[in-house]
Amino acid sequence: MASVAEDHGHGDMVVHVHHQFENIDQQNESYIVGMWCFLVTEIMFFGALFIMYILYRWNYQQDFYGAHLELSQPFHMFGLQEFPIWGSINTTALLISSFTMVMAVRAAQLRQKMVVLKNLGVTCVLATLFLVIKFTFEWPPKFQHHLVPGPNFHPHAEVLHGAAPRASEIFFSLYFAMTGLHAIHIIAGIGVIGALMFLWNKGATSVTEDYVPTEMIGLYWHFVDLVWIFLFPLFYLIPA
Amino acid sequence: MSAPAIEASELTAPHEEQKNYLNADHTVASWLLTGDHKRIAIMYLISVSFFFMIGGIFAGLIRLELISPTGVLLESETYNKIFSAHGIVMIFLFLVPSIPAVFGNFLLPIMIGARDLAFPRMNLASLYVYWLGGGLITLGLLTGGVDSGWTFYTPYSSLYSNSQVSLVIIGIFFAGFSSIMTGLNFIVTVHKMRAPGMTWFRLPLFVWSMYATSVVMLLGTPVIAITLLLVFAERTLHLGVFSPELGGDPVLFQHLFWFYSHPAVYIMILPSFGVISELMANFSRKRVFGYHFVAFSSLAIAGLGFLVWGHHMFVSSQSMYQGVVFSLVSFLVAVPSAVKVFNWTATMYKGHIRLQTPMIYAIGFIGLFTVGGLTGLFLACMGTDVHLTNTYFIVAHFHYVMVGGAMMGFLGALHFWWPKMTGHMYNDTWGKFNALLVFIGFNLTFFPQFIVGFLGMPRRYHYYYIAPEFTPYHIMSSAGASALAVGLIVPAFYLVSSLRGKRKASANPWGAHGLEWQTASPPITLNFVETPIVTDEVYDFSHMDEYEQRRGTAEMTHPGEGLQQDKNLDIVGTKEDK
Amino acid sequence: MEGHSHHRAGPPSVQEPTFHVHSVGLYLWVLIRLVVLMVLTVVLAQVHFPDIDFRFFILHGTMINNLVAMAIAVTKGLLVMLFFMGYKYATKLTKLWAAAGFVGFALIFLVFGDYATRKYEPTPRWTGDPGSAMMRSIKESRTDEEFRALPRGER
């Protein structure tokens, strides 16, 4: 397993071992493997959606291209036609939040409470920024242009950019389903990180004496980022 | 559950009433907030039995309806709701959780020498989520039910059905999460928490099959979760990804649905395989023949099981070439199952067989599962499947493997580990005759269905007046169903009455091998007084012959003679009160 | 089988865990690469690749776009997984289960075997609606007579 830590001498480094475990390394590895197993289920959960998306995109390539133009803004510089500004800002925000999350885990390893709180706080702020952008700049325009699938789906032709309306409805169904599901995971993540911050602030030994709970939540957050890394090119960067 | 006063001084127990997991604490909160895997298993047992009864009532209604060719009892739409309810309750609320959640939870830590599962609180959460899912499904069934079949094919379930599809889907979603949590717990436990000396190849085969089941649960269940969630979204939010009007493909739903639901049938049968391995070894008093083959075949079934889902879709406009691939792999996946059946039979050969109740169930399993598996081969072959699909042949096939296989395994496990779980011994004569009744009733119910299905009776139809020649088969089937129902209700009586009886079980009433038989019946809360160190191989009956056999038979046939406590083993033997 | 003392009756056991702390620089290095790759993928998405003609099949330019985008996404994903999630320094058991997730995901790709080997034609529409996933009850659909009264082209 892991080698001896580099800087390790910050007072009492002992961790309580739960009754079912024999030693702390067994406990820690069990928690980490358990979290990865949960992420395995999340991979399968999102994976089915990706498969559906790939199938429909393969069958309706032109229509998906036309429909996705609604997700970008025209941008005629540097030889580009369109630039997905909100998507790019969101992606950058999530990447940085992943960084601050891993910094929080590192600080948890070093038992630096204030650094942990700061980094977790920035993670939450960036995640909230992601949600704000999504729910004020990305989704409402779709509602206004009648791009919500269902009985109210009647967009004007120029909004569709040449795509067939039925296939666009599939595109937007998948768009709302996948980004919506991802947003639900972000909201849950903010909640969990908030709870973690609360516990760190209180100094609860369950999170302060062992870095593994923080690491587990970090793993979840990185997974959320990982899903977005794949969602972004699939939805926002469809080639002509 | 107070123990009667123990008279003999043979016992070295310092206090009068043995402390075990059942009487450790009597408050309701201590049960509902427990982390003890054994208590959770008992609560699962009660819940699962309850839902089995509900599903059985629906089955009874189906068989009642089918006695007459014109379907006089129920209207078409009601009948649709009845068979859908039967399928949903039996599959999601009984078969999937049954052996893992009850016996896996109870026995897995004890069999590997651990004090508890890796994540006790997640275990409790899985129970609550199961109750939530079961409650929502029951609510959905009480407020109108679903008429789409347990398979929820789109676009009927997503667009046209006027029934409680949304509510029941949410219930299934939660039941699936319960399943995922159980599987996750088992995987980490088996990897990380084995006692010293318990190497992978000293694990009981029950543990191997629990591990394989957990892998399937973990990888497969999320796919149905998202698929059903999308159907829910289509009904409520109009996100039409399966609807043909938009250019969506309903067959895609079938692909994703069966991607889980075929591995799901392996979730249902693999634990039974594990139980049968245990029963075969212990009641033949012989090591399972080809232990490694049986262990690896569990993993092979789990793996190959993910590659065969298309055999449910041969006639659904799926590509014929893809169908060929699925057909081939379906034949392949029969091989590991057959390996197990051969190995169990070889285990019995020249073994010292004792035909007690669990063994009757195990032997019955081998026969019934073989029939079910072989008839599955007819269905794996694309050509014959075109004729047989959507007929009663399929119904008979899956009931042979599910009921004749998985349910017999559940009953065998219940009868085998009942003394361990409760500390009481039931009347074995009742058990044996009941097993025989179940076997006969089962065959009478489902064998005619093979014939009538081959002759053309479609499934999910409640009338067949255009083919009145089917009537004798249906009548036979319904008669058998009555016998089967009796056979399934009777154990409730003799098992529950054993709890109030005075026949207490020793730690090892069967003379069986395994760590669970080295601890008290019922076990103490932390399972073992001291963590065991495993030194002998699995199913090693050579050292146990001297006293265990006497002990086992003595306990069974000469109750009341009192047994000496073996000081080397953590056993509490009790003298029976007459 | 002899016992092995693990007395639970005393105070809960406390022990020192062993783990590895990485430098801030490593994580910063990964972050910079991630952002650079993101910019790259946005730019390359709009580059018009020419079609490449192999003898037996044509690799369309848009397909190259997709491959490039996926390759960059996979690289970003690997960076997040290996370093941020600690896969590179994890135990073998952790690596096994992390990889198992992606193996499981790969299994679903077999679905495409079906769509690749048959002519997938979306159902021609059978109502007058321009296409919306409205929930309908069976009563609202057209009756047989109405359906048969329609000319063939509009069914």
Image (spheres, rainbow, N blue to C red):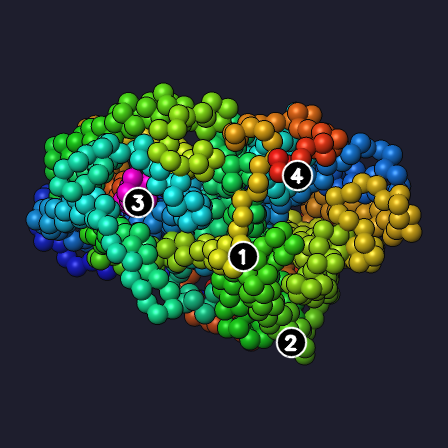
Q: From mark 4 to mark 2, how far is it between C-alphas?
A: 66 Å
Residue at point 38% right, 43% down? A62
Q: Is residue C142 visible?
A: yes
Give the numbered dot on residue C118: 1
Q: From mark 3 to mark 1, how far is it between C-alphas?
A: 26 Å
Q: Residues within 10 Å of mark 1 (few under 14, many from 20)?
A: some
Dot 2: what SS?
helix
Q: Position of residue A154 (x, y in %)?
A: 45, 25
Q: Is residue B445 visible?
A: no
Q: Chain of mark 3?
A: A
Q: Residues within 10 Å of mark 3 (few under 14, many from 20)?
A: some
Same chain for the residues at labels 4 and 2, yes or no? no
Q: Chain of mark 4?
A: C
Image-quadrant location for residue A147: top left
Q: Which quadrant of the rendered structure holds the N terminus of chain A? A: bottom left
Q: From mark 1 to mark 4, how far is it between C-alphas?
A: 25 Å
Q: Which residues are magenta?
A: A226-240
Residue annotated with mark 4: C152
**Magenta stretch, main secondary structure class:** helix
Residue annotated with mark 2: B346
